[in-house]
Amino acid sequence: MKGRTAASLLTGLLILLAPPCLFPVQVGFLKGKVSYSHLGSGWKTVKVGMELIPGDMIKTGPSSEVSLTDDVNEITVLENSTFTVSEKYENETQKQSFMLFLGRMKLKLGSGGKGEPEIRTQAVNLAVRGTDFEVGSGYDGSTVVLLKDGRLAVAGPSRELVLEAGEGTEVPFGEDPAEKFTVMTRVIDWNNWFVLSKESVKGNEADLLARILLRFEEIRNQIASYEELRASSLKEKEDLVRRRDELQKAGRRDEAVEYSREAAGKSRVAFHSNGPRSVRDATYLGMLFICSA
């Protein structure tokens, strides 16, 4: 009976060797023209109630917006925006990740969810400690962050700036966040801000290109580290599976179950360290600048 129970546990654990479910978000509300593309495929119309998964890119048209929700969080992607649903694997834990390439978004973070998501723009990474904030990403790669409630860490290439409720910051592409401002004393005219960000590209193409290439180099280094981690995890998984099979043939099922569990963990690390996801982010980043120049 004990052997049969161990065998059942082993069968269940083998299922874990397959890639785990991804983080979906559901379309709760939309207006105007909103479309999506999965991993660079053709564009399709977004509909209320559908689920979007990592690898889906969303584009909103003029006077359009879409609301994306999971169990507790709500993201609103506003007009003329390009936004990607993603994920990352950090410290053996899956984590939601979203990237705003161009345009504006708002996020309201609920309690009791799957953890705080990561928000990225062309200029910064946002470690979400806040519960209500707005982000704008311009044609020139600059980013504006406005925090209504909570705390928010805005990370540039080499330093981090922590915003408190009622504070904001503006970060040029390729630079670190440096200064805060009080949201109440600085009203952002978003239409004018986007016009200025587009105009600032003209005549500064060489400087922007240099910054883009530097950003690409950073991403390439990240890809290399991900690939190293993936290769080592796959090798460890193979060794664990081989040892598991040996134990199973020897009738030592309880020990085989433990090796299956460890192999499942290595499989998850390898799956979420897949370099092509970062390559795709880099490609999209470059496409935006080429289109806006």
Image: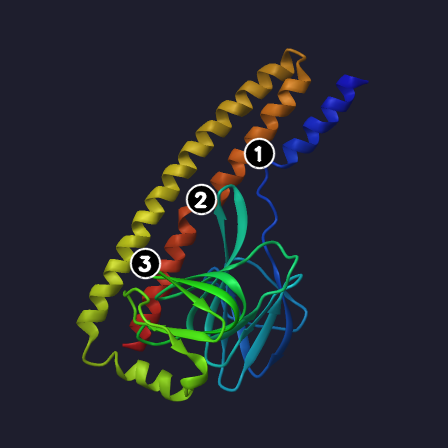
Kindly tell me whether residue 173 is visible in this rendering. yes
Determine whether the residue tagged by mark 2 lies in a helix, strand or loop.
loop
Left or right placement of residue 234 versus residue 171 in this view: right
Q: Which residue is drawn at 22% across and 67% down?
A: 209
Q: Is residue 265 above or below residue 94?
A: above
Which disc is residue 273 wearing? Answer: 2
Q: Determine the residue located farthest toward the top in the rendered image.
A: 250
Q: Can residue 136 be seen in this view?
A: no
Is 148 or 104 nearer to us in this picture? 148
Q: What residue type is labelled 3?
A: Arg
At numbered mark 1, what does the secondary structure look like: helix, strand or loop? helix
| On screen, residue 158 above or below 253 | below
Where is residue 22 shown, x and y percent of the image?
58, 52
Residue 292 x %, y %: 31, 77
Decide which of 120, 247 is in the foreground and name it: 120
Q: Can you give x and y, in whole percent of width and height, for residue 221 in the image?
A: 30, 48
**Marks 2, 3: nearer the viewer:** 3
- Viewport quadrant of the C terminus: bottom left
At which x and y percent is residue 70? Answer: 64, 62
10 Å crowding of disc 3: few (<14), some (14-19), many (20+) = few
Tag 3 or tag 1, which sits nearer the N-term? 3
Q: Quadrant of residue 15?
A: top right
Label 1 to label 2: alpha-carbon separation = 14 Å
The numbered dot on residue 159 is 3
Q: Name the residue under label 1.
A: 264
Looking at the rendered structure, the secondary structure element under dot 3 is loop
Disc 2 marks a residue whose amino acid type is Ser
Looking at this view, is 230 or 143 the one in front? 143
- The amino acid type found where label 1 is placed reads Ala
